[in-house]
Image (tube, coloured by chain):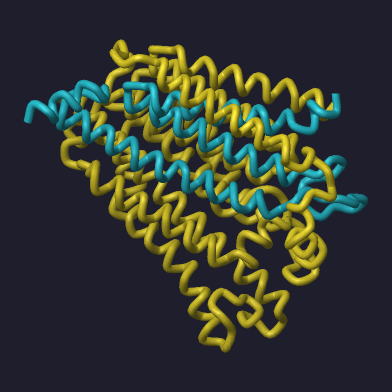
């Protein structure tokens, strides 16, 4: 049991990462690809936060009676990464909107065919 | 008990992600992604990362979902049948996944206090930051003081993303004005409820902004929450009314102002004889200097994030309105 609980978080992170990866490389629709990329991204966040956790520790905010705190550094990195993540997602989505304007489709094989035709 | 919650939430997360693969209805995909973000926010709370959970709930489940729905309104909601074979992607994913699982076996066990990650700089932040910076929330101390330079970089990235989006999708004000029927004007109940909760959301954003030194929160979260209040206003009363309340031009000015405010704190501390962003030189007493510095740069972050999120929403919204008119 302890073997499972020692690595469970990391295994789920790997599973989520691979799910996101699979969606990115197999989906034909660009919006779905972006969702896959976001799932992949959140799984990386989960990996960092899992590593920062201390069993029996508490959130890194000073309170009386707390003896052990979880590591605040990964929290800082991931907090800003989330906001930067949504900013880059917005750029990706606006590119998709422009692709739809120009090609009339957001399915990868369809606009690639149109590119070849030109 | 904590272990059980962790096990169940992570399993739910895995199932939600798995379902996204098989769905062809993109509206359902986006909704599942929103649920996925909420679940990860819950897991972040159980892993003691309360600030991160706050951000994920506001950004991942809130703004991302709104932007993706805006994109779907412009690009269509069903995925077409995929002509490519799925065997090769599956094979690549299985091999990579197996390698990564094999790699995790060498990782230190989850949650152990003696893990290498807790031995280098973490003790210094945990033990010294309450004395050096004087704030109970160590995440804010590290974010705004020790690693203030990184955070400045991230604020600039957010600002440049806004420039990117606004270059790709311009906010077209004149055409939006021609469409007075936008929004949910026919729904009286929604309008009344929105008018009641919008001031509360803004009040909450201000609380998160100025209480971020003591509890979970700070500029990033407050900016997103304040933007959410105006997005709600725009959804219910229509974009033209929202443009009258907060003009797109004003938002562009605000986005730049926030970055300027942040950077000018750094320049000011240099002028006072310190290093860039060394708040100890901002006041006679270094502890006071730290407090002033953190309050001002968090305000800068809050203003930029608010302005950027709302202008990105405006850009998507005015595209959708234009598509409706045509």
Instruction: Using the image as rendered, state which of residue A57 and residue B219 is in the foreground.
Output: A57
**B322 in relation to A83, above or below:** above
Q: Considering the image in quadrants, where does the C terminus of chain B appear? A: top left
Q: Position of residue B200 (x, y in %)?
A: 57, 39
Q: Could you tell me which residue is drawn at 40 percent across and 31 percent down?
A: A34
Q: Residue at x 52, y 74 (%)?
A: B265
Residue sitting at the far bottom: B273
Q: Position of residue B218 (x, y in %)?
A: 61, 53
Q: Does residue B102 lie above or below B186 as drawn?
A: below
Hue of chain B?
yellow
**Residue A9 location, quadrant:** top right
| Residue sitting at x 53%, y 83% | B270
Res A10 quadrant in image = top right
Tell me the shade of chain A. cyan
* Quadrant of the drawing holding the N terminus of chain B: top right
Q: Nearer the viewer, residue B239 or A52?
A: A52
Query: What residue appears at the point 33 percent right and 14 percent down from the top-left corner?
Result: B78
Residue B310 in sight here: yes
Left or right of B199? Residue B27 is left
Q: Position of residue B258 (x, y in %)?
A: 44, 62
Number of numbered discs visible in the structure rendering:
0
Residue B58 located left or right of residue B156: right
Residue B246 left/right relative to B1: left
Q: Is residue B240 visible?
A: no
* Foreground pick, B7 / B279: B7
On the image, the x and y values in percent for residue B303 come to: 47, 56
Residue B188, placed above or below residue B96: above
């Amino acid at each position: 049991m302890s073997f499972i609980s020692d690595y469970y978080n990391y295994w789920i992170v790997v599973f989520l990462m691979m799910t996101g990866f699979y969606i990115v490389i197999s989906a034909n629709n660009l919006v779905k690809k972006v969702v896959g990329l976001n799932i992949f991204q959140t799984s990386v966040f989960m990996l960092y936060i899992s590593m920062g956790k201390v069993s029996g520790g508490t959130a890194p905010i000073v309170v009386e009676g707390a003896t052990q705190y979880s590591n605040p550094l990964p929290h800082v990195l991931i907090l800003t990464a989330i906001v930067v993540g949504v900013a880059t997602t917005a750029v990706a989505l606006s590119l998709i909107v422009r692709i739809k304007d120009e090609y009339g489709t957001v399915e990868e094989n369809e606009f690639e065919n149109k590119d070849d035709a030109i | 008990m904590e272990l059980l919650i962790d096990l169940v939430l992570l399993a739910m997360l895995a199932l939600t992600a798995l379902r996204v693969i098989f769905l062809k209805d993109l509206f359902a995909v986006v909704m599942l992604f929103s649920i996925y973000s909420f679940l990860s926010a819950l897991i972040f709370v159980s892993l003691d990362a309360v600030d991160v959970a706050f951000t994920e709930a506001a950004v991942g489940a809130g703004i991302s979902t709104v932007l993706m729905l805006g994109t779907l309104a412009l690009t269509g909601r069903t995925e077409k049948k995929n002509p490519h074979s799925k065997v090769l992607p599956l094979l690549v994913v299985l091999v990579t996944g197996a390698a990564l699982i094999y790699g995790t076996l060498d990782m230190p066990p989850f949650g152990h206090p003696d893990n290498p990650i807790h031995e280098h700089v973490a003790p210094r932040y945990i033990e010294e930051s309450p004395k050096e910076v004087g704030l109970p929330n160590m995440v804010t101390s590290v974010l705004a003081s020790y690693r203030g330079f990184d955070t400045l970089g991230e604020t600039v990235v957010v600002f440049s993303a806004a420039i990117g989006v606004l270059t790709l999708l311009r906010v077209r004000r004149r055409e939006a004005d021609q469409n007075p029927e936008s929004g949910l004007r026919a729904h009286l109940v929604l309008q009344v409820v929105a008018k009641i909760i919008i001031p509360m959301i803004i009040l909450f954003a201000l609380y998160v902004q100025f209480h971020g030194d003591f509890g979970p929160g700070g500029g990033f979260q407050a900016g997103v929450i304040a933007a959410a209040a105006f997005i709600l206003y725009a959804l219910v009363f229509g974009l033209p009314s929202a443009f009258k309340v907060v003009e797109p031009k004003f938002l562009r000015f605000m986005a730049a102002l926030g970055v300027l405010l942040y950077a000018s704190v750094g320049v000011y501390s240099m002028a006072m004889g310190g290093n860039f962003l060394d708040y100890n030189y901002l006041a006679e007493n270094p502890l006071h200097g730290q407090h002033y510095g953190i309050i001002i740069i968090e305000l800068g972050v809050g203003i930029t994030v608010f302005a950027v999120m709302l202008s990105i929403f405006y850009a998507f919204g005015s595209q959708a309105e234009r598509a409706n008119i045509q």
